[in-house]
Amino acid sequence: MSRFYTNSKVNRVKEKSFTPFLIVWTGQLLSGLGTGITAFTFGIYVFNQTNSTISFAMVMLTLFVPAILIGPIGGVFADRFDRRVMIIIGDTGSAVAVMFLLFFTLSGRLFLWNIYLGIAMSSAFTALQGPAYKALLSDMLIKSQYSKAGGLMQLASSAKHLLAPICGGFLLAYAGIECVLLLDILTFAFAIMAVVFVPAVEIMSQNRKGFHFFNEMRNGWKSLIETPEVMQIVIKLTTVTFFIGCIQTLFTPMMLSLTTAKTLGIILSLSALGMVVGSLIISVTGLGKDLYVPLRLGLALGGIFLTIMGMSTHLVIISIFLFLFFICLPLINISAEVLIRTKVPNQKQGRTWGLTGFLTQIGYVAAYLSAGFLTDKLFNPLLQDQGVLAFNLRHIVGSEPGRGQALILMICGLGLFLTALSGGKR
């Protein structure tokens, strides 16, 4: 068992190279895409079978909650065990969860509880290996390569969100859900082989004697809050995720008051290409030496673009500025990630990524819980003909249906701009 610990003797790579990272990244790109296709497909399948929005929301919940709860646990293990092994365990567990779903699908006994349980298991194992994957980047690369590697990781995430709905819809229509599950299993197999064939890297040794899980978790939290610069970045990211959660919740209702569902889908797909463009640019050019500059620039420009988008009811203008907003997201995410990576010791990065993921996800939860309520109970009534804000903001926002959502998005844009001006190194 000693070979699984970070202080075990392993074959060490004398000189760090970008090639091993590319191999691991390719495997994780494919497995992430497979997972995204499976999640999208089962969301559609459940809704078609039940015609229930609640059942559909439960699929999203079983994807989301394990990622929040398990991430910090994975972070502790990533700092104590061989990070490659943690990735293999995560991918293997996720593959077993997909096999579980495939078994019930082929046997004709696929029920809602099977789907919820299988997706939750897969999500939990993915969250378990997430901090190890992020921390492994620091093991494999030198600091000057962090920005380009971060761009590729963001590109993989963007590609998953962009391609999963397209591929999932096609496969579900022409091949069936069994084919989707088989494809997902194959992507996990490729990801596991990619990690297996990458040589081990040297990691700072740790004394494994006296290992106590909760002490390790507490030490990770203490280390995070005692590093003011890192904590400020985490707070910024949590704020950003809150605003993005508001966009995810409110953009669709706002747009459906202006256009059809088909046009909405086209606008979302084309605009999401902005994340791919932004990620590609950073992976090629890097971010420069002062990482606070692209971080603040991304926040400020993203806030401006989001505000202008909220002010307009013209589909072309909305599409253009949503595309520009999406270009800014990789700038924000990658700058923040590289800043954290360079300020946290390698032997603590697993716990840092686990806790950072947990804290930033709170922003999404807060948005999901509050955005709809604020729209329906506060801003929409205030913008109606007799509402308090109707006279003052009519010429800026309008008072038509959906403008309450638009006003909140404008406020989110202003919030992003102010976040760019707050805290951190100047």
Image (cartoon, grey):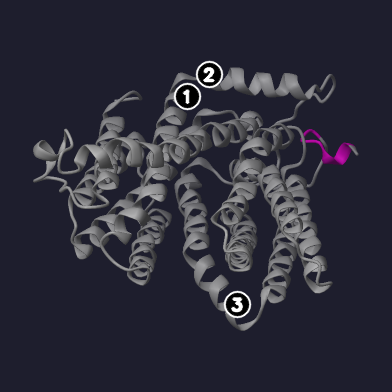
- Part of the protein shown in magenta: 2-7
Which SS class for mark 2? helix
Label 1 crowd bin: few (<14), some (14–19), many (20+), radius 10 Å: some
Quickly name the residue at label 2.
Answer: 225
Identify the amino acid type marked 2.
Ile
- Determine the CA span between mark 2 and mark 3: 46 Å
x, y percent for residue 248: 41, 50
Q: Looking at the picture, does residue 142 appear above or below residue 176?
A: above
Q: Looking at the picture, does residue 109 appear above or below residue 306?
A: below
Label 2 crowd bin: few (<14), some (14–19), many (20+), radius 10 Å: few
Mark in the foreground, 1 or 3: 3
Residue name at image x 81 percent, y 73 percent: 106
Residue 358 circle label: none
x, y percent for residue 243: 37, 40
Left or right of 195 on screen, residue 357: left
322 magenta-colored: no
x, y percent for residue 72: 65, 33
Front residue of 347 and 113:
113
4 magenta-colored: yes
* Residue 109 visible in this rendered orientation of the protein: yes
Quickly name the residue at label 1.
Answer: 231
- Of callouts 1 and 3, the N-terminal one: 3
- The answer to whether mark 1 and mark 3 are in CB contact below 8 A is no
Label 3 crowd bin: few (<14), some (14–19), many (20+), radius 10 Å: some
Quickly name the residue at label 3.
Answer: 171
- Of callouts 1 and 2, the N-terminal one: 2
Front residue of 275 and 166:
166
